[in-house]
Amino acid sequence: MTTLFSPIRLRDLEIPNRAWMSPMCTYSADPSPSAAGRPTDFHLAHYSARAAGGAGLVMVEATGVAPEGRISPFDLGIWDDAQTPDFARIASAIRAQGAVAGIQLAHAGRKASTGRPWEGGDWLSTEEYGWMPYGASPVAFPGGPVPHEMSREDIAAVVTSFAEAARRALEAGFQVAEVHAAHGYLLHSFLSPIANQRTDEYGGDLAGRARLALEVIDAVRAVWPQDAPVFLRISTTDWVEENPEDSRESWTYEQSAQLTAWAGEHGVDLVDASSGGTDIVPIPHEEDYQTRYAARLRTDTTVPVAAVGRVKDVRRAAELLSNGEADAVFVGREMLRDPSWANHASRELGEAPRFLEQYAYAL
């Protein structure tokens, strides 16, 4: 029986367990031009602690593939070769603690150029290190500016940016690259009819709206080793079709299942199944509000799936694996609260935790 602490092999990479740290922005980079995007000592300590705490894979937060691809000027970025050594420290530290090092490559699109959430998260002006966001169409996210509609040249540049970012991540020592196509950010804004009103080959039907995401996957896969995995994070639904009072055409589970199948054909090894983010809409509050869609994807497609979202209870996390609802679990807020969540979970489930020798005396 598959358990939360069974290893999993994706291509030639073995991940020691299936309790993984979800990519979560910390908004802790220096926004000044000379230091922008670079991870700091905070990031080194933050990610090292979760690796030492027993996570099988530590996924570094959304990392901008271009300066304007960051959610905020306080986000990480890997658009310049000079940033690579700073990321190498992070990847090396994660691996030294026994975990697999992953990085989420991202472009925030029309939701870019905002402040820190705990400072209000408002859109920032150029005087505040902000910039004009880019999007599939000139359709603003609620409360935000109308984004610059991307030309074909802009789109081609983004695809190249993802490939170059993946190359740098590989040079830094990361073992997994995840393409971020969820939460209303750039790739999701192309996928969803709510944000994509284009009439060219990057709009219209599902194949057109999925074109950019698949081009990015191809570009990343072309520079990533064939024996190493590439993940894709998607929003399984916009949470619009589930609302009977909202009749808009939107991104739906059925389209997610088709995208997952296509992504597998293009070399994606696991889909990280999240949800929402394209618009401000009501969403459920149950613990399994989006893990249920991960379970459906795992049944309806042949691509391995990771569940994520409000996974708080250790035994529920274990059930997702033992019941065949997911191949792995990304844990977010609980790992922020407790860096050793994975080790504590393993003891609760009667498994052997991955304590470092320096901490063994605390048993």
Image (tube, rainbow, N blue to C red):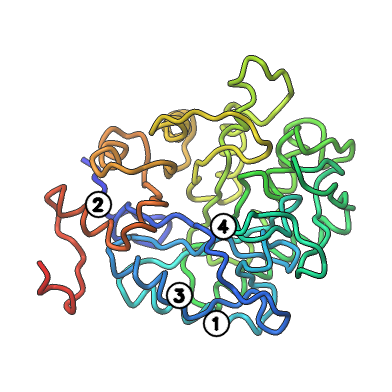
Residue assigned mark 1 = 86
What numbered label is drawn on residue 6? 2
**Where is residue 201 shown, x and y percent of the image?**
85, 41
Real-space Cα distance between discs 2 and 3? 23 Å
Residue assigned mark 3 = 91
Please tell me which of labels 2 and 1 falls first in the chain: 2
**In terms of secondary structure, where does tag 3 sit?**
helix
What numbered label is drawn on residue 118? 4
Please tell me which of labels 4 and 3 falls first in the chain: 3
Real-space Cα distance between discs 2 and 1? 32 Å
Q: What is the crowding at mark 4: few (fewer than 14 residues within 10 Å), some, or many (at least 20)?
A: few
Q: Residue at x 80, y 56 (%)?
A: 133
**Where is residue 35 shown, x and y percent of the image?**
65, 82
Indicate left or right for 86 with 93 as reference.
Answer: right
Q: What is the crowding at mark 1: few (fewer than 14 residues within 10 Å), some, or many (at least 20)?
A: some
Indicate left or right for 258 with 41 as reference.
Answer: right
Q: Nearer the viewer, mark 2 or mark 3?
A: 3
Q: Residue at x 63, y 68 (%)?
A: 74
Q: Amino acid at mark 1?
A: Asp
Q: Nearer the viewer, residue 170 or 267?
A: 170
